[in-house]
Amino acid sequence: MSHWIAACAVDDIEQEDVARFDHEGRTFAIYRSPDDAFFATDGVCTHEKVHLADGLVMDHIIECPKHNGRFDYRTGKAQGAPVCVSLKTYTVKVEGDRVWINLD
């Protein structure tokens, strides 16, 4: 069973940027890629629990603002030390002007 929730407006995120979304005690990061696609991951770095929305987006990579650990936000895969544990990813869809994420 799908659990879709509206996370933000499309215009809330520029291309090659990230936004934070909090829902029911959890934090998510929502990304808009250079080719205008949207992605979502858990919003906290698996290394030191820092909010990734404060990080730097470079192409399809999010860099944690604390220790510069990097993840591919399309897959959640950790890109090397200091991060070793990948991020959970979520299915995203755009309907109208809203970005939705599936929490299942």
Image (cartoon, rainbow, N blue to C red):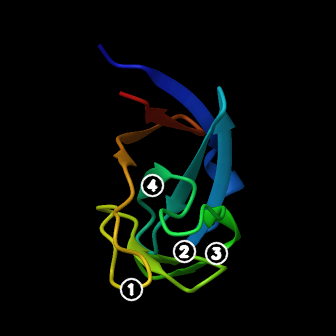
* Front-most of residues 20 and 8: 20
Quadrant position of the C terminus in the picture = top left
Residue furthest top as drawn: 1
| Residue beneath disc 3 | 55
Quarter-of-image position of residue 56? bottom right
Return the disc, 1 or 4, that comes first in the chain's sequence. 4
Q: Badge 4 local density, few (<14 within 10 Å), some, or many (20+)?
A: many
Q: Is 39 situated left or right of 12 in this image? A: left
Return the disc, 2 or 4, that comes first in the chain's sequence. 2
**Considering the numbered disc 1 on the image, is that residue within a helix, a strand or a loop?**
loop
Q: Residue 88 placed where, x, y %? A: 37, 50
Kind of residue sitting beneath label 4: Phe
**3D distance between C-alphas at marks 2 and 4:** 10 Å
Q: Residue 64 placed where, x, y %? A: 58, 76
Kind of residue sitting beneath label 2: Glu
Say which mark, if any, is on residue 38: 4
| Residue beneath disc 2 | 16
Q: Are marks 4 and 3 in contact (CB under 8 Å)?
A: no
